Image: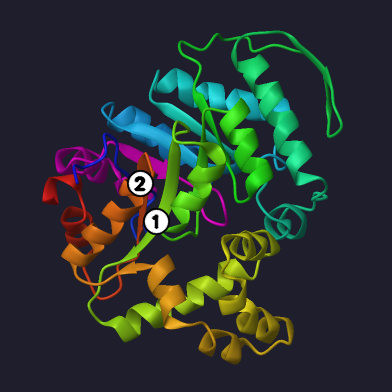
Amino acid sequence: MTAPHRFGITIPFDGVPLADHEAWFHRLVDLGYSDVWSAEVDGVDGFTPLALAAAWEPRLNLGVAIVPAFTRGPALLAQQIAGIAEAAPGRFTFGLGASSQVIVERWNGIAFTEPYQRVKDTLTFLKAALSGEKVDMECPSFTVRGFKLARPIPEVPKIYLAALRPGMLRLAANHADGAILNWLSAEDVRTVVDVVGEDTPLTARIFVLPTEDRDLARMVGRRMITAYLNVEAYAQFHRWLGRGPALEPMWEAWAAGDRKKALEVIPDEVVDALIVHGSFAECRAHIARYVANGISVPNLAVIPFGVDLAEAVAALAPAAR
């Protein structure tokens, strides 16, 4: 199949200081990448890498997948979005999500209550504030009185919602500009499309470990899967996708505190579905299945075990197709 119109990659790159990313950004464009997408978990914040990309490489589209709805006040969040939107007019997509109890409550000391409502209220506020309105808003999760952005935005950015199950997916399809997916197989994309419809733009972070050492890929993949899919939101997502029976032994072992067994009982087919691995050609073919099933903007998260990062980025790029 033909390459998608947009093709992204996750930044910042592991092992590369932020100050050294300028040459990487130029090279990404030369290789055919159209987008760079940051994240906000436990490394740098979601906005700083995009500010650098906006200044250093004006040909790139910018996205963040995702920023939690809980960890900034609504007004501050609007200001940060406005800053990147002003620095990169028409090139920025903001990704909003609930995040998780670990990030919001355990790491930031903020109660993780009614996440769907918080995301819905934040989306409503941002759409008003970013359009230049003066916002007076009293909603279930917060109250804002008289906020108005002092600097108008040249072009209001699109807002995508991180969505893992039907309720949030429908919110993304009906009230946002698209949906952000994570930790799903190429075939799972069709399950999502059945909920949001064919016209909803979808981006997905796709974990790519380009090695032909399948034992190594599965070992790394199992560690990643236990780190993520034991989070309740992701566990519920995979139950909804129908992967519950395959993952139930892992969840039971993890709950019992047996981390070794939790790794061992993850079936190979689950790792192979959720982690793209193999030769460069096999990885490219696997990524193409995500696009064929409905992903508008694939967002590669390259895990360079046993391969040079620059080589992997080049070999997986649109120019290599």
> Eyeballing the image, is 42 above or below 3?
below
> Eyeballing the image, is 234 above or below 176?
below
Is 119 contained in the magenta span?
no
**In the current view of this chain or complex, which residue is farthest to the left?**
320
**In the current view of this chain or complex, which residue is farthest to the front?**
194
Residue at 81% across, 45% down: 114
Residue at 57% across, 32% down: 173
Tell me the amino acid under the disc marked 2. Pro
Left or right placement of residue 6 versus residue 318 in this view: right
- The first of marks 2 and 1 along the sequence is 1
Instruction: Evaluate whether residue 46 shows in this view.
Output: no
Residue 175 placement: quadrant: top right
Question: Please, which colouring scheme is shown?
Answer: rainbow
Residue 60 position within the rendered picture, expressed as x and y whole percent measured from the top left? 30, 32
> Eyeballing the image, is 190 above or below 148?
below
Which residue in the structure is indicated by mark 2?
Answer: 298
Instruction: Evaluate whether residue 183 shows in this view.
Output: yes
Q: Residues within 10 Å of mark 1 (few under 14, many from 20)?
A: many
Tell me the amino acid under the disc marked 1. Ile
Residue 88 placement: quadrant: top left
Residues at circles 2 and 1 in contact by the CB criterion of under 8 Å: yes
> Eyeballing the image, is 50 above or below 44?
above
Residue 214 position within the rendered picture, expressed as x and y whole percent measured from the top left? 30, 82
Residue 259 position within the rendered picture, expressed as x and y whole percent measured from the top left? 62, 87
Alpha carbons under labels 2 and 1: distance apart: 7 Å
Which residue in the structure is indicated by mark 1?
Answer: 206
Residue at 25% across, 76% down: 306
Residue 319 position within the rendered picture, expressed as x and y whole percent measured from the top left? 13, 45
Q: Secondary structure at mark 1?
A: strand
Residue at 41% across, 42% down: 37
Q: Which residues are magenta?
A: 18-43
